[in-house]
């Protein structure tokens, strides 16, 4: 029955293929271990506890040269996730905007967006990373902001753009600050729930609730907690007088991160723009005409009629673009950004000589990140998919 019945035959073949793959992987693993033993080498990750012995230019957690290789790998992993999250958000905004504007009736706007898409899609992303890194490096020296009478002042008294990156105020977390953050997160969830309820009410009963309560929902609880708890979050401002050669204080977003983030965003945004354009064109023109006949404005037609239907076409290729952006972040070493490839797959590998262990762990990290992005986007894709009766 397992071979002759069409209902079970496919499952039988899949199970057999799984068993073969398991035995193949086990044979390769045992072969690797035996070859290493024959060469006098042992397969071990004990090197992760040794001091790393190198510095990392930008770290989201505390790190110094005496930290372990494991901590250096975690710093690199967090840096990779930082670029991936920032890049996916920015690329989505750029891609959706460019994709919609490519269909604009304004000839100049449509042609400019076409030029952007064709220019960035047909030039390797590494070249854009190097080019944007060079442009950032052409910025002014930090010295123009220093001294009693600087050549230029901080932008809005808060930010400084230099050839080393962007210096901005850094938050100071004091006792009670966690509750302000919790209130802010709860406010974001509540605002999202209200917008979801508003949209559901519009589609089910035609009742359009006002959008203005979203801002108070977002702002009031966090601000109230902030003052009730005695202003537990402060700001460490950039100091232009404490150092003769560089800005002190604040938080510095260094040039490598800016170059990598912007390059990956505008490059991937060009591909997303084409996905968005294809999704919009896949929606029947009659939908636009029907919505217009009901008196809806063009912006509401796009937000309420076209894009919700186009998402069913946009989301599947969008998942691939997010995965590509995350994997392309491994080019960070070209501008000196310490991601997981530069730390674990670069310096740690060269210092310890543990190539197989480092590469296997690096592959595992990228596999987990990619599967996580895929799982999250597939859940969202299922939520916007057409529900059949």
Image (cartoon, grey):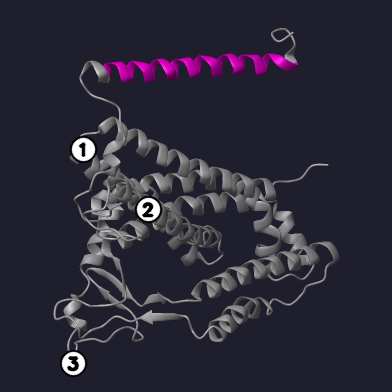
Q: Is residue 183 left or right of residue 360?
A: right
**Most frequent secondary structure within the magenta stretch:** helix
Which residue, as the protein is rendered here, is positioned at the far bottom?
Answer: 149
Q: Residue at x 36, y 50 (%)?
A: 74
Label 1 neighbour load within 10 Å: few <14, some 14-19, many 20+: some
- Helix, strand or loop status at disc 1: helix
Quadrant in the picture for residue 293 = bottom right
> In the rendered image, which quarter contains the N terminus?
top right
Residue carrying label 1:
352
- Horizontal and vertical percent position of residue 192: 66, 66
Between disc 1 and disc 2, the foreground one is 1
| On screen, residue 235 above or below 314 | below
Q: Is residue 4 visible?
A: yes
Q: Are marks 1 and 2 in contact (CB under 8 Å)?
A: no
* Disc 1/disc 2 C-alpha distance (Å): 39 Å
| On screen, residue 258 above or below 8 | below
* Disc 1/disc 3 C-alpha distance (Å): 50 Å
> In the rendered image, which quarter contains the C terminus?
top right
- Horizontal and vertical percent position of residue 368: 47, 41
- Horizontal and vertical percent position of residue 130: 25, 55
Q: Is residue 201 left or right of residue 142?
A: right
Nearer to us in this view, 125 or 8 = 8
Numbered tag placed on residue 149 in the rendering = 3
């Amino acid at each position: 029955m397992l071979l002759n019945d069409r209902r079970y035959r496919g499952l039988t073949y899949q199970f057999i293929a799984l068993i073969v793959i398991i035995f193949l992987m086990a044979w390769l693993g045992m072969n690797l271990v035996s070859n290493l033993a024959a060469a006098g080498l042992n397969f071990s990750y004990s090197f992760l506890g040794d001091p790393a012995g190198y510095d990392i230019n930008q770290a989201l957690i505390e790190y110094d040269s005496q930290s372990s290789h494991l901590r250096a790998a975690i710093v690199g992993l967090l840096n990779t996730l930082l670029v991936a999250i920032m890049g996916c958000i920015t690329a989505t905004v750029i891609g959706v905007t460019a994709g919609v504007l490519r269909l604009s009736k304004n000839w100049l706007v449509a042609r400019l967006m076409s030029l952007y898409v064709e220019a960035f899609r047909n030039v390797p992303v590494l070249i854009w990373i190097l080019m944007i890194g060079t442009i950032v490096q052409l910025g002014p020296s930090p010295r123009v902001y220093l001294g009693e009478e600087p050549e230029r002042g901080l932008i809005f008294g808060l930010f400084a753009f230099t050839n080393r990156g962007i210096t901005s105020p850094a938050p100071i977390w004091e006792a009670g600050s966690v509750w302000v953050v919790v209130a802010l997160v709860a406010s974001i969830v509540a605002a999202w729930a209200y917008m979801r309820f508003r949209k559901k009410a519009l589609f089910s009963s035609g009742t359009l609730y006002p959008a203005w309560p979203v801002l108070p929902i977002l702002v009031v609880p966090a601000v109230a907690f902030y003052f009730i708890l005695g202003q537990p979050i402060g700001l460490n401002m950039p100091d232009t007088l404490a150092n003769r050669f560089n800005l002190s204080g604040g938080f510095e977003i260094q040039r490598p991160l800016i170059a990598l983030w912007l390059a990956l965003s505008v490059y991937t945004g060009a591909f997303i723009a084409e996905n968005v354009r294809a999704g919009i064109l896949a929606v029947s023109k009659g939908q636009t005409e029907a919505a217009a006949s009901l008196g809806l404005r063009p912006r509401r037609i796009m937000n309420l009629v076209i894009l919700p239907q186009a998402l069913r076409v946009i989301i599947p290729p969008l998942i691939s673009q997010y995965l590509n952006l995350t994997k392309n972040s491994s080019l960070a070493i070209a501008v000196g950004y310490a991601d997981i490839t530069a730390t674990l797959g670069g310096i740690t590998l060269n210092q310890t000589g543990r190539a197989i262990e480092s590469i296997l762990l690096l592959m595992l990290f990228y596999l987990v990140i990619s599967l996580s992005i895929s799982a999250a986007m597939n859940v969202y894709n299922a939520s916007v998919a057409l529900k059949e009766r």
